[in-house]
Image (cartoon, rainbow, N blue to C red):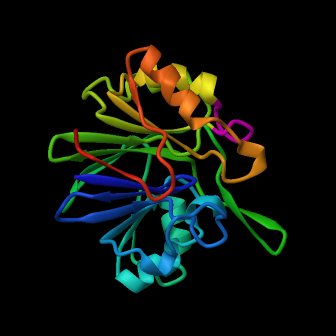
Amino acid sequence: MKVTYWGHSCILVDTGKHRLVIDPFLTGNPVAAVAADDIQVDYVLLTHGHSDHIADAESIARRNNAPIIAIVELADYLANAGLQTVGMNLGGSRIFSFGKLKWVPALHSTSVNQDGVSIYLGVAAGILLDLDGFTLYHAGDTALFSDMKLVSLRRPVDLAFLPIGDHFTMGPDDALIAAEWIGAKHVVPVHYNTFDAIAQDGERFAAELKRIGIQGHALKPGESLDTF
């Protein structure tokens, strides 16, 4: 399995049989390492409905004839645009062709703005993926909260993607605590350095992870990790 970081919170997961993209925000992203038109996937996964996470979901899903998997209100919103969606909710899990997906809580808001009006799109969530025995956790946008301790209660997390940008999500100090609570073997920081408001030092965060016994990987947009 191979995971590629495309910038902000966008991750491509390639299992060898299936390709999944999580939170595709590429168009209008100043640090994106790929164009939306170049993304080839089987599924689109969305943690929540903010524009910096769903910006290219529709175009990628249409071009690839790929289902979008999301929290039910966001899935319904996108289904109204004629897209194939699978709506789920917190705590729910389902077996897909690529493996098992489970939704876990995230502490954040979620909406889109249309003509000056905010449209509610359900709750924000994190994604747990069980891919042939390899467990991946994408925390989405979240603050630190104590129930993150439960994420790895039933299964150890091999690789976690945690936001560190602060301002809109938890910052590096809280993300270090989250990494310990989750007990992840490997952590990749996301949701930082896209804009000035979320500027952070990813290398420093990775070094702090190493100090507490966790392997940190401050991937640059376009860089990948193979399974370890």
Q: Residue furthest top?
A: 212
Percent coordinates x, y for residue 85 in the rendering: 40, 71
Say left or right for 119 vs 98. right
x and y percentages locating residue 26 in the rendered image: 57, 68
The residue lying at 25 percent from left, 29 percent from top is 155
Is 79 positioned to the left or the right of 94 in the image?
right
* Residue 99 x, y percent position in the rendering: 20, 53
Q: In what quadrant of the picture does the C terminus appear?
A: top left
Depth check: 114 or 167 in front? 167
220 falls in the magenta region: no
Number of numbered discs visible in the structure rendering: 0
Residue 216 spot, x, y in % from top left: 43, 31
Magenta stretch, main secondary structure, is loop
Between 102 and 21, which is closer to the camera in this rendering?
21
Q: Residue furthest right?
A: 116
Residue 200 visible, this orientation = yes
Q: Is residue 220 above or below residue 36?
A: above
Provide the residue span drawn in magenta.
165-171
Q: Is residue 147 visible?
A: no
Q: Residue at x 50, y 24 (%)?
A: 207
In which image quadrant can residue 168 be found? top right
Q: Residue at x 51, y 69 (%)?
A: 76
Q: Which of the 4 image quarters holds residue 183?
A: top left
210 left or right, relative to 193: left
Q: Nearer the viewer, residue 137 or 198?
A: 198
Relative vertical location of residue 103 with respect to residue 186 in this rendering, above or below: below
